[in-house]
Image: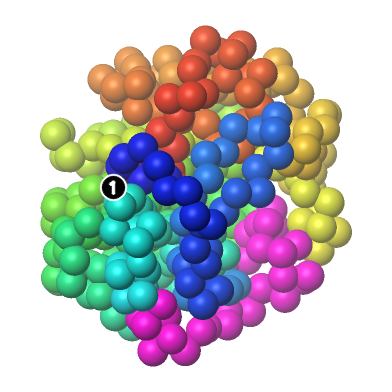
């Protein structure tokens, strides 16, 4: 949630419906609560598995809050008692792709530069990072969502290729930004080990030494009922074998195999395995992997 222990006793603030606390995680799922910056809703990309399909009842067309209202809400949060006491990171990519409208996001990023306590998190599949590179910012964190090229070809329509996204990660890293990476959802397609090994090698070979991702978050497919209902191409759902309170999942042995594979490959390439985390995974899986979920440092938190 923030960089300090929260001792705030009053109700968690909701700033104009724009700065909102995400705390809906089911008990058996590890997903630390975090702050959303709801500047927009929807996404111009067309990933078949995208949960925004269900959230928007089938309508993923981008819709924007008036930018003046967004900037005012951000300013209000900076002066609110809770945020004065708790440094926080604001996730702008939970209900939209953070870079789907760079001109608007540029204004938001510049707003965060007016203070030094809180950070803006950009979560994106876009490679449109020109405004970030041209003007480096200290209070913005860039998180790239990646997948294997074969998964991209099947289910991530209208998005830049994984190679282009890795290129964007390299550019913002060289410009001085903290870079995070999400490899999610990882699909066990035929020959998946080879495809994802190539992705990991590409990522860690392109980003300069000393500027590698600050953290890497791994996730496997989550099949929420509404997401599946509004997905036009449901071929991605054939891998599900189990249910959880966060939708359908791959079998536990399959998920464990996937996570151990990534741990091994990333470790072989010198990546610090303490900076690897899991997205919306069961507490039981964390235990099976010998990981401490109370020390989770995943994508959306400080």
Q: Compared with residue 207, is residue 272 higher up or lower down, i.e. above or below?
A: above
Say which residue appears at 18% left-offset and 72% top-offset.
114
Q: Compared with residue 263, is residue 197 higher up or lower down, i.e. above or below?
A: below
269 left or right of 210 in image: right
Membership of 108 in magenta stretch: no
Q: Is residue 197 visible in this depiction of the protein?
A: no
Say which residue appears at 20% left-offset and 53% top-offset.
177
Q: Residues within 10 Å of mark 1 (few under 14, many from 20)?
A: many
Residue 107 position, x and y percent, is 29, 80
Residue span colored magenta: 44-73
Assign the C terminus to one quadrant of the image: top left
- Here the colouring is rainbow
Q: Which residue is mark 1?
A: 179
Residue 251 position, x and y percent, is 76, 23
Say which residue appears at 40% left-offset and 42% top-offset.
6
Quadrant in the picture for residue 192: top right
Viewer-proximal residue among 48 and 5: 5
Residue 116 position, x and y percent, is 17, 60
Viewer-proximal residue among 109 and 219: 109
Q: How many marks?
A: 1
């Amino acid at each position: 949630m923030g960089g300090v222990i929260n001792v705030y006793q009053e109700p968690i603030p909701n700033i104009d419906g724009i700065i909102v606390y995400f705390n809906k995680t089911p008990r058996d799922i590890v997903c630390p609560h975090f702050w959303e910056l709801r500047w927009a809703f929807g996404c111009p990309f067309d990933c078949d598995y995208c949960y925004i399909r269900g959230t928007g009842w089938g309508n993923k067309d981008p819709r924007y809050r008036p930018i003046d209202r967004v900037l005012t809400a951000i300013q209000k949060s900076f002066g609110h008692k809770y945020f004065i006491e708790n440094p926080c990171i604001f996730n702008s990519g939970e209900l939209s792709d953070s870079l789907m409208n760079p001109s608007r996001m540029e204004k938001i990023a510049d707003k965060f530069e007016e203070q030094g306590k809180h950070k803006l998190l950009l979560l994106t599949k876009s490679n449109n990072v020109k405004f970030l590179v041209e003007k480096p910012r200290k209070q913005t964190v860039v998180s790239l969502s990646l997948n294997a090229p074969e998964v991209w070809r099947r289910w991530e329509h209208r998005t830049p290729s994984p190679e282009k996204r890795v290129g964007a990660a390299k550019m913002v890293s060289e410009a001085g930004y903290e870079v995070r990476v999400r490899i999610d959802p990882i699909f066990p397609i035929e020959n998946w080990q080879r495809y994802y090994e190539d992705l990991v090698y590409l990522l860690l070979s392109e980003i300069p030494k000393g500027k590698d991702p600050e953290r890497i978050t791994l996730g496997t497919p989550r099949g929420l009922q509404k997401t599946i209902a509004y997905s036009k191409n449901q071929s991605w759902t054939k891998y599900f074998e189990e249910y959880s309170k966060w939708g359908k999942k791959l079998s536990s042995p399959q998920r464990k195999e996937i996570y151990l594979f990534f741990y091994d490959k990333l470790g072989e390439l010198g990546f610090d395995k303490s900076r690897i985390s899991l997205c919306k995974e069961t507490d039981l899986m964390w235990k099976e992997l010998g990981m401490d979920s109370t020390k989770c440092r995943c994508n959306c938190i400080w």
